[in-house]
Amino acid sequence: MAGLNIAVEFRHGSWLTPEHQDSVFHLLRKYQITYVTADEPQYGSLATVPFVPAVTTDIAYFRFHGRNKENWLKKGIDTSLRYSYLYSDEELMEFKRTLQQVDKRAKVTYAMFNNCHGSFAVKNALKMKEELKS
């Protein structure tokens, strides 16, 4: 279908291991599929994807899920509790630097806060918007 952009967000760390990254990103570039960089809790295993900023099309896309290690892998809980995480100002400043670097390689950059429990996403998105203007 012409005119539609396709994006992929990996949900298992095996996609982004050092031995697979180059071939995965090559494939995405070849087929013009936008890679979605995700931030989520890290456990030192493949249970989650590592934060690996990359640009595979003219669109850079980030999803900030939060880093709620306590709830992320729990079974039987309300899904929104996995995303119950308010990023600190220090974490947001790290993301700001990353977004600014990646934005130089993309025509457009999207940053979506999916830490959607309560008003965390809105608070973090407004803070990031303010920081990116400065």
Image (tube, rainbow, N blue to C red):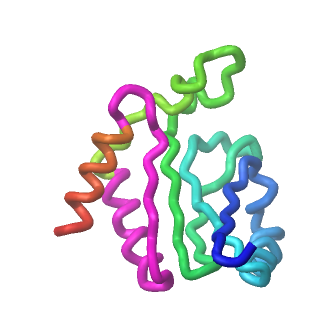
Position of 28 relative to 116 (above/below): below
Q: Percent position (x, y) of residue 61?
A: 53, 65
- The outermost residue toward the top is 76
Quadrant for residue 77, please give it.
top right
Q: Percent position (x, y) of residue 128?
A: 29, 56
Q: At 72% from the left edge and 81% from the top edge, which residue is drawn? A: 29
Quadrant for residue 121, please give it.
top left
The magenta region covers 91-120
Q: At 20% from the left edge and 68% from the top edge, which residue is drawn? A: 133
- The image quadrant where one finds the N terminus is bottom right
Q: How many marks?
A: 0
Q: Is residue 37 left or right of residue 101?
A: right
Q: Percent position (x, y) of residue 106?
A: 49, 81
Position of 103 relative to 61 (above/below): below
Position of 105 relative to 55 (above/below): below
Q: Does the magenta-highlighted stretch encompass residue 34?
A: no
Position of 19 relative to 39 (above/below): below
Q: Does the magenta-highlighted stretch encompass residue 109?
A: yes
Q: At 81% from the left edge and 55% from the top edge, which residue is drawn? A: 14
Q: Percent position (x, y) of residue 56?
A: 64, 78
Q: Is residue 54 left or right of residue 100?
A: right
Q: At 51% from the left edge and 32% from the top edge, which residue is drawn? A: 83
